[in-house]
Amino acid sequence: MKLKKNILICPLNWGLGHATRCVPLINELISQNANVIITADGRPFDFLKDSFPHLEFINFRGYNIRYPKTGKMSLKLLTLLPKLFYRIVLEHFEVKRIINDYNIDLLISDNRFGLWNKNIPCIFITHQIMIKTPKYLHFFEGFLFRISNFIIKKYNKCWIPDFEGSENLSGDLSHKYPIPSNSEFIGPLSRFTLSGNKQEVIEYKYDVLAIISGPEPQRTILENILLSQLKSSDQKAIVVRGITDFMEHNELRKNCDIFTHLPTEKLKEYILQSKIIICRPGYSSIMDISALGKNAIFIPTPGQTEQEYLAEYLFKKKYFFFSKQIDFNLKDALEKSKDFRGLQLSNKPENIQKTIQKFLELRI
């Protein structure tokens, strides 16, 4: 009998997106007889622990960077670069100990830069081959692209969760520059799938589903804006606060329910039952919404250049409406979103299956 391979999965801890898009990979690894061990912290740890309670978990501290209440996130990141590089170097040596202690055969890092190891095959997952900068730092873009390439080439492979052609979700982030030689497009990764059974898409029960996510304090700021406007609205709504520490259900008013968080299948059910989704344009959220073929209103995290770019990119393609957080008006956004068609762009399960098969066959 073939021995199981020990696979280490390590998602970044900036919001839940890096953890949620690991779900289809974890499921496929388990189905292919791999022993999956997950290292994470914070909300990604809680989410994956809740989703896969039978797996082994290691608490592995992330970068712990908070977004500013005001000002430019890009400027704050520049000041935090020494701390960030220190954490990358530190996690490189920390993961070496984990690999030895748990007899790890293969490793998948979702955007954690320091988790390559010369003794085992390592995969890096990213949709950002180039890091988008604000216009006033545009001259810095090429330099960041070279740094990104340098890090990516430390890994055996880089998986880009998008399609290669013009019909794609990431735009410049993975299509502007030539991809590194060890990289390949593997298609979008979403924890949600449609079975193809028309009965799965049931009738609309809600006007709005608001999913709040991302780093603090901007998560709370957006929550306050949305709850304030929904309270005076007659829209039948569901609000998911994106807090995984505990499960709680409250009512804001009649026909407006608030959940701290929801299990994957229940969230999928509410998404399908809602006319429109309001959320951050985090890349994983975009993949999830596109996998289910839903329309959405995006509110980028202020100062988060990647989200601001993706929201504008998809807006120009007439896929999704977006609004700046400071200008958000629920009534106005709902009306303007009617001019946008949404998008259905999902990956085939057999593509993910083949990707994992090739990964399990990797050798140093």
Image (cartoon, grey):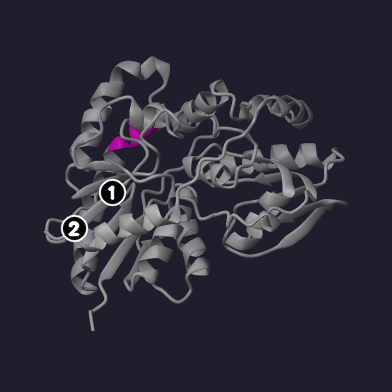
Asked where in the image residue 34 lies, by quadrant, the reply is bottom left
Query: Label for residue 121?
Result: 2
Residue 79 within the magenta-colored segment of the rendering? yes
Side (left or right) of 260 relative to 89: right
Left/right placement of residue 201 relative to residue 99 reads right
**Kind of residue sitting beneath label 2:** Pro
Q: Residue 292 or 304: which is nearer the viewer?
A: 292
Which image quarter is the C terminus in? bottom left
Q: Is residue 9 shown left or right of residue 295?
A: left
Q: Residue furthest front?
A: 197
357 and 132: which is toward the camera: 357
Q: Quadrant of the N terminus?
A: bottom left
User: Would you identify the image quadrant in which residue 333 lies?
Assistant: top right
Q: Is residue 93 above or below residue 153?
A: below
User: Secondary structure beneath disc 1?
Assistant: strand
Q: CA distance from mark 1 to mark 2?
A: 10 Å
From which residue to which does the magenta span run?
Answer: 77-81
Residue placed at 35% from the left, 17% from the top?
138
Residue 124 is labelled as 1
Task: Decide whether the magenta segment is chiefly helix, strand or loop.
Answer: helix
